[in-house]
Image (cartoon, helix red, strand yellow):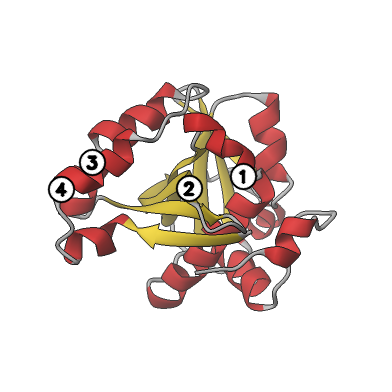
């Protein structure tokens, strides 16, 4: 199975008709997270247009030639504020450095991340493969616009926590009912560059994956 990541921004700049783009976005469903579905249906296009985020469409090409939209993710910018109580050891563990990086740190935000449950398309990609595709895109972004850490917010759900933690994300703090997880962007860059993964064990999708 071959995976291809297509940028919504590229579709717009290639003058693909808005109605066609919206048809693609409206074909995305996520009953497990209505907030993600709402973003894709009602905000992704405008956020892309004004530069608030970049959304990526993940397609899986079957061996018999059919191609399906199996997932989406979006990247943007955010920030976190360092507490004066953060120890040198914690700073090294969470940010990957003890260098004086300031109090308010700009981050690369994984804003949305979900499989597409329309027609059962979610079965054609697993969580490890999807995060590998996200990391590949982060590597490209980080090489041009570096960020100290990559940032993701999630609900306090044991399954979500285990999922992010197996890729190396560390809990930074709780804010407004959500958990803030961080991972040094250099660690992502190095892992992708060296064709390594940040989880164990490596499954078959890590070997078969075709990155865009």
How packed mark 2 is, by other alpha carbons closer than 10 Å (few <14, some 14-19, many 20 or more), is some
Q: Which residue is mark 3?
A: 22
Q: Distance of mark 4 from mark 1, alpha carbons? A: 27 Å
Q: Is residue 45 left or right of residue 78?
A: left
Q: Is residue 45 left or right of residue 68?
A: left
Label 4 close to label 3 by CB (< 8 Å): yes
Q: Which residue is mark 1?
A: 124
The N terminus lies in quadrant: bottom right
Q: Which residue is mark 2?
A: 68
| Dot placed on the residue nearer the N-terminal end, 1 or 2 | 2
The residue depicted at 62 percent of the width and 59 percent of the height is: 63
In the depicted structure, whether residue 151 falls above or below residue 198? above
| Dot placed on the residue nearer the N-terminal end, 4 or 1 | 4
Instruction: Provide residue 158's location: percent of width, then percent of height.
Output: 70, 26
How packed mark 3 is, by other alpha carbons closer than 10 Å (few <14, some 14-19, many 20 or more), is some
How packed mark 4 is, by other alpha carbons closer than 10 Å (few <14, some 14-19, many 20 or more), is few
| Dot placed on the residue nearer the N-terminal end, 1 or 3 | 3
């Amino acid at each position: 199975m071959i995976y291809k990541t297509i940028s919504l921004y590229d579709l717009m700049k290639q003058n693909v008709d808005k109605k066609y783009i919206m048809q693609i976005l409206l074909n995305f469903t996520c009953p497990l997270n209505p907030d993600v579905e709402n973003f894709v249906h009602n905000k992704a296009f405008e956020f892309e247009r004004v530069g608030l985020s970049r959304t990526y469409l993940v397609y899986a090409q079957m061996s018999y030639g059919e191609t399906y939209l199996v997932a989406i993710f979006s990247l943007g910018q955010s920030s976190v504020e360092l507490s004066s109580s953060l120890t040198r050891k914690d700073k090294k563990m969470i940010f990957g450095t003890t260098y004086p990086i300031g109090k308010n740190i700009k981050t690369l935000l994984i804003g949305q991340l979900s499989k597409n449950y329309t027609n059962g398309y979610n079965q054609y990609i697993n969580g490890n493969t999807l995060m590998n595709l996200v990391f590949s895109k982060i590597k490209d972004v980080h090489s041009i616009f570096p960020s100290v850490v990559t940032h993701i917010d999630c609900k306090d759900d044991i399954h979500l926590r285990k999922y992010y933690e197996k890729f190396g994300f560390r809990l930074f703090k709780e804010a407004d009912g959500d958990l803030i997880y961080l991972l040094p962007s250099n660690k992502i860059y190095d892992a992708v560059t060296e064709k390594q993964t940040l989880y164990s064990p490596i499954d078959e999708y890590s070997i078969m994956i075709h990155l865009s």
